[in-house]
Amino acid sequence: LNDAIGIERGLMTTIHSYTNDQKILDQIHEDMRRARAAAMSMIPTTTGAARAVGEVMPELKGKLDGSAIRVPTPNVSIVDLTFTPKRDTSVEEVNALLKAASEGALKGVLAYSDEPLVSIDYNHCPASSTIDSLETAVIDGKLV
């Protein structure tokens, strides 16, 4: 996406299963939110995902930020990326770019879906990430 339409700035929210760092019941933890019962709460917390993107793609360093929400599911995560493109775009263009990437250079790493699936459907997906094309949205060509 950055190569084709550019990313001026963006926010990402990672929504992922709770981890071993979290407690099953309310207990002591240095982070008060992570002290709460992980299997019974949606827990806002920090993420290093946005910073990690900047390390892998230096041209995006400092242009992305984000947060995380830990949810009571056993596996599978989702990332909601919202960004301002450097030029106007459309849902069709964004999806075409992502589909092309999944069939080209990122084949086997990035998958593309146009089916109405939910997290459990991706539990044994061999790809590292799957694009849910049904959720792609663009507002006035200026917000993806």
Image: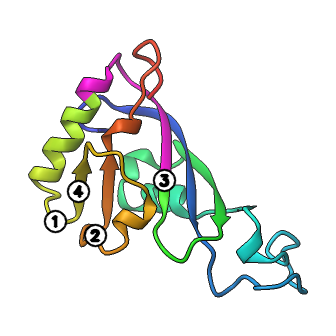
Task: Say which amino acid is labelled 1.
Answer: Gly
Residue extending farthest to the top is: 140
C-alpha span from label 4 to label 3: 14 Å
Residue named by callout 2? 125
CB atoms of marks 1 and 2 within 8 Å: no
C-alpha span from label 1 to label 2: 10 Å
Residue 63's x, y, as percent? Answer: 52, 42
CB atoms of marks 2 and 4 within 8 Å: yes
Residue 121's x, y, as percent? Answer: 36, 64
- Which disc is residue 79 wearing? 3
Q: Quadrant of the N terminus?
A: top left
Q: Secondary structure at mark 1?
A: loop
Residue 77's x, y, as percent? Answer: 48, 64
Residue named by callout 4? 111
Q: Is residue 36 magenta?
A: no
> Mark 4 vs mark 3: which is more N-terminal?
3
The magenta span reads 79-93
Nearer to me, 78 or 2: 78
Q: Is residue 88 magenta?
A: yes
C-alpha span from label 2 to label 4: 9 Å
Vertical comparison of 32 with 131: above or below: below
Task: Say which amino acid is labelled 4.
Answer: Ala
Task: Say which amino acid is labelled 3.
Answer: Val
> Mark 3 vs mark 2: which is more N-terminal?
3
Label 1 vs label 2, nearer the camera: 2
For mark 1, does the 10 Å Cα neighbourhood hold few (<14), some (14 to 19), or many (20 or more) residues? some
> Mark 2 vs mark 4: which is more N-terminal?
4
Residue named by callout 1? 108
Task: Please identify the quarter of the rendering in which residue 19 is found.
Answer: bottom right
